[in-house]
Amino acid sequence: MTRHFLKDDDISPQEQAQIIASAIKLKSNRFADRSFEGPKSVALIFDKTSTRTRVSFSVGVSEMGGYPLLIDSQSSQLAKSESIADTARVLGRQVSQIMWRTFAQSNLEEMAQHAGVPVISGLSDDYHPCQLLADLQTITEHFGKTEGLKVAYVGDGANNIANSYLLAAAMAGMNVSIAAPTNYQPDEKVVARARELGTGEILVTSDPVEAVSGADIVTTDTWVSMGMEAEQSERISDLQDYRVDEKLFEKASSEAIFLHCLPAYRGNEVTAEVIDGKRSLVWQQAENRLHAQKALMSFLANND
Ligand code: CP
Ligand code: NVA
């Protein structure tokens, strides 16, 4: 059966660990995996803007011997309302895999239902699972493990990154704390799923100090995700007390690291002092998108 990666728990915790281990290996030998030799093509479709996802998937497919077929959906017939199902049937007969950055999670599900080839989420409104593979790789490289560590996410606790942290970090055996104002907290179903997937503690609080206390990893994300631009000023005002600054970061473990999926808005969700500080691993994290996604594409290519 064709496997897809539309959200973090579409793979098992064992498969997640296997993909991260293979990402770390591929990082030291970038041309070792030639799963797309031919070249086979991989469609990379964008409904939203992107720097890291576009670059890392394009470079990754090339390094695996393949051809990255970049599609800006605004210039495709999807923009003129050709159906997702028909688009999937056309692409699936020509490309080996499809990566799609889109709005609704249901778009990805529909694409996966009709494509006949693996479909990967490059971010939806609900999840960003590829980002979490890169984050878990970065955490593993730094601490030598993920099990038993505590990650604190502060800010918009209801967005795609927070949801993916809940699922993927729980699967990796971590304790996850989310600090967000009550109307920015994650959906109860996602929290319940995280508790089902992991053995660590899952905490949702409106107190950033409680969440960050003793954390090994502190992370945040933009207060205004793509598609939410109309709420920009309201969100910036609502989230003022959820900025990761030095004072908050000090409540974490003295060995704690800072992560951010980027793009970052210095002065909003994080101060320059923290993101540009010694304990920030954001550039290593951004590079790891490349290695983690290559490992994922290889896994999907060889499990079809
Ligand atoms: N973190 C991330 O997905 O970055 P882009 O939006 O630049 O792809
Ligand atoms: N939450 C952000 C992540 C960007 C990579 C957004 O959806 O815009």
Image (spheres, rainbow, N blue to C red):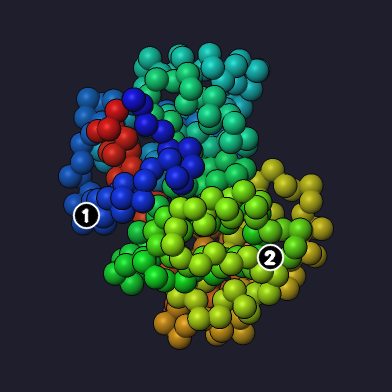
The C terminus, quarter of image? top left
Above or below, 292 against 259 in this view is above
Separation of marks 2 and 1 at Cα, in angstroms? 36 Å
The part of the image, by quadrant, that contains residue 209 is bottom right
The amino acid sitting under disc 1 is Lys
Above or below, 241 against 79 in this view is below
Percent across and percent down for residue 30 are: 23, 49
Left or right, 54 with reference to 153: left
Please name whichever residue, 12 or 236, is drawn nearer the observer in this view of the structure: 12
Q: Residue at x 65, y 52 (%)?
A: 188
Percent across and percent down for residue 234 are: 82, 58
Above or below, 110 against 89 in this view is below
- Name the residue tied to disc 2: 180
Of the residues under marks 2 and 1, which one precedes in the sequence? 1
Left or right, 294 with reference to 285: left
The part of the image, by quadrant, that contains residue 286 is bottom left
The amino acid sitting under disc 2 is Ala
Q: Badge 1: few (under 14), some or many (20 or more) residues near its Cα, within 10 Å?
A: some
Q: Which of the labelled discs sits on residue 25, or is there none?
A: 1
Q: Which of the labelled discs sits on residue 262, or is there none?
A: none
Please name whichever residue, 29 or 186, is drawn nearer the observer in this view of the structure: 186
Left or right, 166 with reference to 117: right
